[in-house]
Each structure stands twice: as C-alpha cells, then as structure tokens.
Image (tube, rainbow, N blue to C red):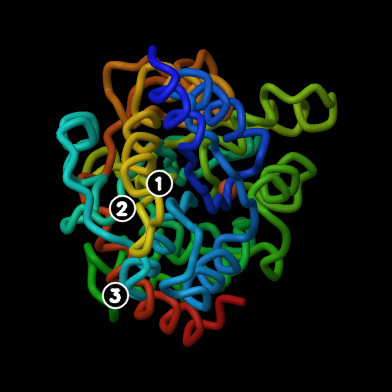
Amino acid sequence: MSLLAAGVLSAAEVNVYSARQENLIKPILDQFSEQTGITVNLITGGADELITRMDLEGANSPADILLTVDVGRLHRAKEMGLLQSVDSDVLMSSIPEQYRDSDNQWFSVSLRSRVIVYDKDRVDPGELSTYEDLADPKWDGKICIRSSSNIYNQSLTASLVSHNGVEATEEWARGLVSNMARSPQGGDRDQIAAVAIGQCELAVVNTYYLAGMLNATSDDQLEQAQAVDVFWPNQDGRGAHINVSGAGVSEHAPNRAEAVQLLEFMVSDEAQTWYAEANNEYPIRTDVPVSATLESWGEFKADPLALEQLGIHNAEAVRLMDRADWR
Ligand SMILES: [Fe+2]
C-alpha cells in the first residue's frame, strides 16, 4: 500500500448516532474499523433524542448513520426527511423485502418477536392462541404489559390495525386493558418478573429480554425467567409479530460512502453472528444460525407484514390506545 493510500484510509471516518446500548454495538464497530481502517465515532443516546438532534442540526448534522430499534422510529426519521435512499446490492440481497423501507431509506439488521409468555404452573398453553385472544374476558385480571407510550406496544398495536382495522383494534385494546392485572409499569423484564411472583399469569414481551434473563448471571433473573415459557401467537394464522433493529444513512451524511460500507458490514457474517450471540436477536440473514436459547424455543411462523406498515399506522395506534385508556 502506498503512503498516499494509507493516508487517505486513516483519514476516513463515519459518525454513528446510535440508540443501541454501547456494549451491544461497539464490538461490531471496532471490528469494522479494524478491517477497513475507517474510524467510527459513536454517539449514543435515546432514539427520540437522537432523531430530534439530527432534525435540529439539519444540513450541518455530522450524523452519517442513525442506528436504532423499532421500525416506528425508523419510519419517523424517514418521514421527517432525515434519511436518504441507499442503492446497495449487498443490502438488497441480504435483507428480505418486508424488512426494508420501500424507498430503501432504512434497513433492518436484526429481528425480534413480541411474544406471549405464560406462567408454566398456572396457565395451560392450550388456552392460548392469538394476540386478539388477549382481549377475551377469560384473561380478566391476568395480563401484565407495559405502557402504551412504549414503542414496542405501539408497533404491536399498529400491526393489529394493519390486519384488523382501527375499530376492531380499539375494541381489542379495551378488552386488553380490562384484562390487565395492574396499571402498566416498568419494562419487559419487569413484566416477566411480575408473572414469576404471581402478579399476573401472562405477559407480552420481546424475545431478547427473556433470552437475556435466561442467560443472566444473577440468580434472581434466571429464576424469574425459568418460571415462564414462550408462546408463539397467531401460528394458525398470519404468524407472530416481528420488529427489528435497523439503520439508515442520514440525508446530509458527510461520509456517505463509509456509511454505506458500514451498513453493508452490519449484514456480514461476523456482525450477524454477533447480534445472534450477544443479544439473542434473530439474524436478518436466514443463513446465519440463531443462539442456543432461541434455538431451544423452536421455529415459528412470522407475520409477513411489510414492516413499514407499523410506521404508517403508528399515529392511529397511539390514538386508539389512548381512547382505550391504555396508560
Ligand atoms: Fe428493547
């Protein structure tokens, strides 16, 4: 390599605005830097905070990539004009169509499902069936689920709007609210803990939270997680609700080429294996194996809905959850 080329390489950098925990993303970014010589400047923050920051910075934003969880947020960033289209054969061939924006402004890099977990001792899984069934009065006072301000619940509700319409989904939300064991509080792990201590019989949680607890070093979390089992909803119909972590290249990216290179790296074998193993997420690429914990839950049918629909129906979902008094 000539001195000139080396000089050019060492000057290359990419600025990542990341809403993911640093310990989940830093090792992948370090590998990328090692392989390419591109320096990664990582700015970590809350998703909504980073989106607002990009918006305020406008054309002067140093952000090259926005990396976050939940399609609702990726879609919001797109609608705000913060992202740009990326034309990449690597991304197109690695990421199934339902998991990319139709204008190629955001791309999923890992998957998770929002599932029902149930108390192994008190619930007969034969009684469980669909998300819709959670509104059935037979679950009166038995369900724990977090707040409607949580984007995962907004996206789940948006998926129901996509499939069943606003009216039916509002009725569903009312039924679900009346079946809650307690007023929504805490995160997904807290819902699992609440089932474990008998406050409720069912909870609705993202897969990686339960997997994380099953692999926790703390005995408390492990015991709580072992009190429940996973139920894959809607397996006789459309399949279980899917959400993602994903990323897009920012509209004003000062380092566009490096940003695309990093996005492509995120669907590489190494990065995909990291997501699978370190965070118990489902790889976006079907040819990368899942972690042992996810493997133990078996295969399941995933809802084939184009995920951008979750973003498109987010506002309707939020309004109907509010009307249904989902706190
Ligand atoms: Fe999460």
**First in sequence: mark 2 vs mark 1:** 2
**What is the spatial separation of the Cα atoms under label 2 and label 3, in whole angstroms?**
30 Å
What is the C-alpha distance between the residues marked 2 and 1? 7 Å
- Which class describes the residues within 10 Å of circle 1: few (<14), some (14-19), or many (20+)? many
- Count of numbered badges drawn on the protein: 3
Give the x, y percent position of residue 216.
Answer: 74, 25
Q: Nearer the viewer, mark 2 or mark 3?
A: 2
Determine contact: label 2, label 1, CB under 8 Å. Answer: yes
* Apparent side of residue 84 relative to residue 265 in the rendered image (left or right): left
Q: Is residue 158 above or below residue 44?
A: below
30 lies above or below 242: above
Q: Earlier in the sequence, mark 2 or mark 3?
A: 2
Can see residue 249?
A: yes
Give the residue displayed 39% in from the left and 31% down from the top. Answer: 266
Real-space Cα separation, disc 1 to disc 3, in angstroms:
30 Å
Amino acid bearing label 2: Trp
Q: What residue sits right under mark 2 in the picture?
A: 106
Q: Which residue is mark 1?
A: 246
Residue linked to disc 3: 168
Q: Amino acid at mark 3?
A: Ala
